[in-house]
Image: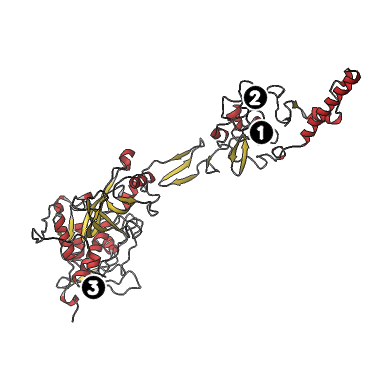
Amino acid sequence: MGTRCPGRTLSPSTSAVPRVPRLPLPAEGTRTRGQRQSDTEGTVTSPGQLAASRRSPAAGTGCGDMSGDMRALLCLWLVAQVARVALSSRVRSRRELGPGLYQHGVYDAGGSYCQRGDVCCRGRDDGCTVPYHDTLCYCDLFCNRTVSDCCPDFWEYCLGIPAPFPKPSGCARAGLHYPTGATYRDNCNLCTCGPGGQWQCENHACLMDGELIDAVNRGNFGWRAANYSQFWGMTLEDGIRHRLGTFRPSPTVMNMNEMHMNMDSNEVLPRHFDAAAKWPGMIHEPLDQGNCAGSWAFSTAAVASDRISIHSMGHMTPALSPQNLLSCDTRNQRGCSGGRLDGAWWYLRRRGVVTDECYPFTSQQSPPAAPPCMMHSRSTGRGKRQATARCPNPQTHSNEIYQSTPAYRLSSSEKEIMKELLENGPVQAILEVHEDFFMYKSGIYRHTPVAEGKGPKHQRHGTHSVKTTGWGEEQLPDGRTQKYWTAANSWGTAWGEGGHFRIARGVNECEVESFVVGVWGRVSMEDMPHK
């Protein structure tokens, strides 16, 4: 009979069995390193005994103690059995002939294999395996021989003894071993290999959160979310700090008198309106502020560009320079660290700016201070100004200065904003941006509660400013009508609906109707087309 490890009940099958309390060390007479159990018999044979049996098949059979025919028959039978055992011992399996797992050193000595599979098997069980990189390792007692094919954690997990090789310092990840102090990034969080062999990761809220994206797309919120590579690796705090950049208007500015539109109470406005369709070639594409918290400059330049184009009847279609504002409008402004809308409009009225081609955007990475101003102007009379420096872009020679009239605040009335858009062109609006807005892909946006269950650090908001360009409405599956505004953001055309987004209209969603600004471009008769 084969030897059995005491204290353990074995499954009769040859497959790996779930682990029960640790296997005891082999008792006296059981197989250990340098010994091998026969594939066909349960006996344990040492290498010396096996060699002796090969030299003398009848040795040790007891045939010399018997007489007569019975003795002859018994001797023949015993010789045949010993020969069969000897023959079977010569036919060694591929596993026995293998070089073992550790001929080139221990790989992933601290890995979890037998423990992960929760298997420890008695005796020899060729099915008691766990995947080990591009091969298999074993969790049966037979693996613990001179040419070992045991899993690295077999000794500690199954036998409760130290492994016969030192446990390396460092951490494992994706099948690879890293030294103590090694780092990798998991989205926005930095993970460091600690001295105890465990990865220690930061716990920031990330700007792109897969759980929130899935929650939005599973919910019936009326819009879809997506993962943007431009935001991957940023914390939510980074997004609020570097991707917005409009200071909330001061109480004095918020108390400005609102300009009301002359409207007949029975006036009917169209259900859909798109400024680009009414003024083709005069509405500019969405801009990209990068990691510059300068939406105050980008939204101002965007609205002024469209308004000058419209009010000059397309004779002038400048794409004005946000960088001119970021670098030169420094009075109570902070460049790529934020600014005020009223200050931006003051500068555009009093000093004016050149085109983006003349003074291109360079402040991508939100430096502590904006680059020094490279464009100045002087008055030429009648309120007009002239540049006193060449374009920072040496490839462009046109340094014409463009200005606006004083900006005016519109009423927060939905219809009055629509009337202004319809008659005079795009307007500027502040927007309170929440954590889910960064993930917006399409549909009619409303702020969702998906982050509420993740704790306060996953719920952040900040003030932004955008260019509102139109409106519309959409029939919902339940038969209701959802009204919306269309607006251009400043996060590039890969974000949202080609750089635009739609947001619920008439309910002051995210304060989009609370502070709306219009302006007229300063256009003289000499700027108008002549017949």
Residue 272 screen position, x and y as percent: 21, 60
Q: CB under 8 Å between callouts 3 and 1?
A: no
Residue tagged 1: 143
- Disc 3 from disc 1: Cα separation: 83 Å
Res. 17 image quadrant: top right
Name the residue: 85% across, 28% down.
57
Under mark 1, the amino acid is Cys
Is residue 210 in view? yes
Residue tagged 2: 25
Tell which residue pokes out farthest to the right in this image.
Answer: 68
Residue tagged 3: 316
Of mark 2 and mark 3, the one earlier in the sequence is 2
Of mark 1 and mark 2, the one earlier in the sequence is 2
Secondary structure of the residue carrying numbered label 2: loop
Q: Is residue 283 above or below residue 31?
A: below
- Disc 2 from disc 3: Cα separation: 90 Å
Q: Is residue 133 above or below residue 145?
A: below
Q: CB under 8 Å between callouts 1 and 2?
A: no
